[in-house]
Image (tube, rainbow, N blue to C red):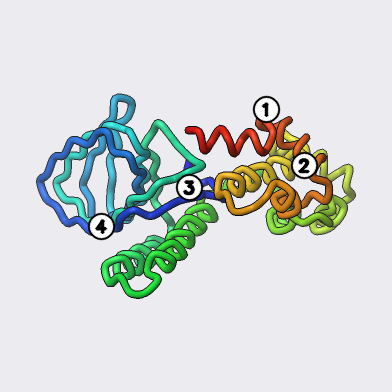
Amino acid sequence: MIFEQEYIIFEILDVLFFDQKNSRTNNSNRNFDAISFRYKADTTLNTYKQQIEVSDDSICYVPSNLSYTRKSKKDKLIVIHFKAFNYHSEMIEWFNPENPEKYRNLFNQILNCWNEKEVSYKNECSALFSKILSEMYKDNQPAYKNKKIGESIIYMEKNCLRNDFSLAVAAAKSFMSEPYFRRLFKKEFSMSPKQYVIERRMEYAKALIIAGYFSIQEISKLCGYNDQKHFSAEFKKITGVSPSKYGYNFNEN
């Protein structure tokens, strides 16, 4: 789900407010993604695979190029139209946040910023949207079955991109030996801590490559690798292509 993605590369296209009653719309061939927050809703979204009942205070993601029908008794929402460069889904995704007031304020801020169009408003809106995505990511992290390793996971999330990242230090955060931590971690995540760190680094690397602002050498350092050859080998092992080929393939598409 997009709500579980830590790194989304995006471009905002529009921010809109709707307040509709007893409406029906058919949507197809939209070349943009959309994330909305609904203040009030009694709405049904239908695709050829899904029928979703959308209610008050829900957040909903609709991917580009997905045909769907929206039927509403009432639908009061703010929607952000954007282009996601490193994420796509074939399904509508949604969740109901535990703290809707937080999102209500953020969506209000981004709508006001977009409508007022003051100097550098696109940068400010991008910052607000990044904040929205960040909050959604944090709110959709799974609860760990084994709470013993919670502090270690927090350490890994914050430090896995550092070139001095230490699994021994991560284990110590939960007051356990490294071998014991590795066993508990693998039981929790069905992968080793080392593989988890590598996958986190590669997800960040892919986002940086797509952004196009850094060289492969710079990206390798930003992802915690002192040796570019080692980084490139790990990247190809995960993705099947070299970092430079990955960037070329994306730009071609």
* Other-residue count near label 2 (Cα within 10 Å), few / some / many at <14 / 14–19 / ≥20: many
User: Residue 123's quadrant in the figure?
Assistant: bottom left
Which residue type does callout 2 highlight? Phe
Q: Which mark is residue 231?
A: 2
Q: Residue at x 13, y 40 (%)?
A: 24
**Where is residue 251 drawn, in percent x and y?**
52, 38
**Could you say which is closer to the camera, residue 10 or residue 247?**
247
In the figure, 126 relative to 184: above or below?
Answer: below
**Where is residue 244 drawn, in percent x and y?**
66, 38
Task: Give the number of the mark in front: 4 or 1.
Answer: 1
Q: Which callout, 4 or 1, points at the residue further toward the start of the chain?
A: 4
Kindly report the distance in space between the C-alpha atoms of the residues bearing marks 1 and 2: 13 Å
Q: Which callout, 3 or 4, points at the residue further toward the start of the chain?
A: 3
Q: Which mark is residue 3?
A: 3
Task: Give the number of the mark in front: 3 or 4.
Answer: 4
| Cβ atoms under marks 2 and 4 closer than 8 Å | no
Circle 1 residue: 240
Secondary structure type for disc 4: strand
Is residue 143 shown left or right of residue 182? left
Q: Residue furthest bottom?
A: 119
* Other-residue count near label 3 (Cα within 10 Å), few / some / many at <14 / 14–19 / ≥20: many
Kindly report the distance in space between the C-alpha atoms of the residues bearing marks 3 and 2: 27 Å
**Could you say which is closer to the camera, residue 149 or residue 225?**
225
Secondary structure type for disc 2: helix
Circle 4 residue: 16
